[in-house]
Amino acid sequence: MSERTLAIIKPDAVAKHVIGDIIQRYEGAGLNPIAMKMVRLSKKSAEGFYAVHSERPFFNDLTTYMASGSVVLLVLEGENAIAKNRDLMGATDPKKADTGTIRAAHGASIEANAVHGSDAIETANFEIGYFFPEFE
Ligand code: ADP
Ligand code: MG
């Protein structure tokens, strides 16, 4: 089934100049960008995006990090886009991510792990609408 998912190229990956490599991986896997923008998130905007994690001990560090530099926001479309992107990303902790995944290649730490990807249809809908209200 064709789906849409939200991806973020996080500040660590932007700083490492691997935007192009990551987008090439999406396109190579059949995840077609249908919307894209580069922005610097405010701390408030990062907090709203990660509201589901607001009770986690790492929430303040995570949202500070997400607002620490530019990010690239993308809507990706393709067959099974949500699960496919999660496979392409690899595990949250880059040390545990399978070889060949984006996080294994580019992630620096469990926090600065190169990319975000929606994890379910409901979260994809919320996340796409959060950054691309015109897609709702
Ligand atoms: P994922 O991004 O793989 O879906 P989560 O939704 O669990 O992972 O966490 C959201 C983000 O919070 C992670 O991508 C990572 O940047 C950060 N994070 C997750 N777990 C930790 C942790 N234990 N310590 C610091 N940051 C974390
Ligand atoms: Mg998640």
Image: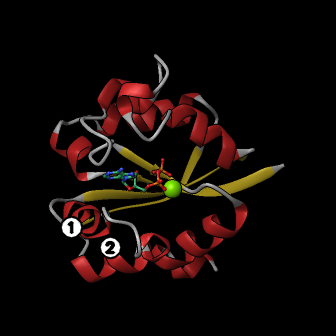
Q: Which residue is mark 1?
A: 67
Question: If the image is split into quadrants, where does the C terminus sit?
Answer: bottom right
User: Which sits in the foreground, 96 or 4?
Assistant: 96
Q: Position of residue 51 (x, y in %)?
A: 44, 77
The reply, left or right, for residue 7 in relation to residue 107 is right
Ligand 1: does it lie within 8 Å of the C-beta at label 1? Answer: no
Q: Position of residue 33 (x, y in %)?
A: 53, 50
Q: Which residue is mark 2?
A: 46
Q: Secondary structure at mark 1?
A: loop
- Counting residues from the start of the chain, the first of labels 1 and 2 encountered is 2
Up-down: is 105 above or below 122? above
Q: Position of residue 78 (x, y in %)?
A: 70, 45
- Of the numbered discs in the image, which one, if any, rests on residue 20? none
Judged from this view, the residue extending furthest toward the top is 99
Residue 110 location, quadrant: top left
Task: Give the amino acid at mark 2.
Answer: Ala
Up-down: is 74 above or below 115? below
Residue at the image position 16 percent from the left and 59 percent from the top = 69
Residue 68 location, quadrant: bottom left
Crowding at dot 1, Cα within 10 Å, few <14 / some 14-19 / many 20+, comes out as many
Q: Secondary structure at mark 2?
A: helix
Task: Give the amino acid at mark 1.
Answer: Ala
Ligand 1: does it lie within 8 Å of the C-beta at label 2? Answer: no
- Contact, mark 1 vs mark 2 (Cβ under 8 Å): yes
Residue at the image position 64 percent from the left and 71 percent from the top = 125
Residue 88 location, quadrant: top right
Crowding at dot 2, Cα within 10 Å, few <14 / some 14-19 / many 20+, comes out as some
Distance of mark 1 from mark 2, alpha carbons? 7 Å
User: Which sits in the foreground, 72 or 67?
Assistant: 67
Residue at the image position 42 percent from the left and 74 percent from the top = 49
Residue at the image position 42 percent from the left and 31 percent from the top = 102
Q: Position of residue 63 (x, y in %)?
A: 27, 68
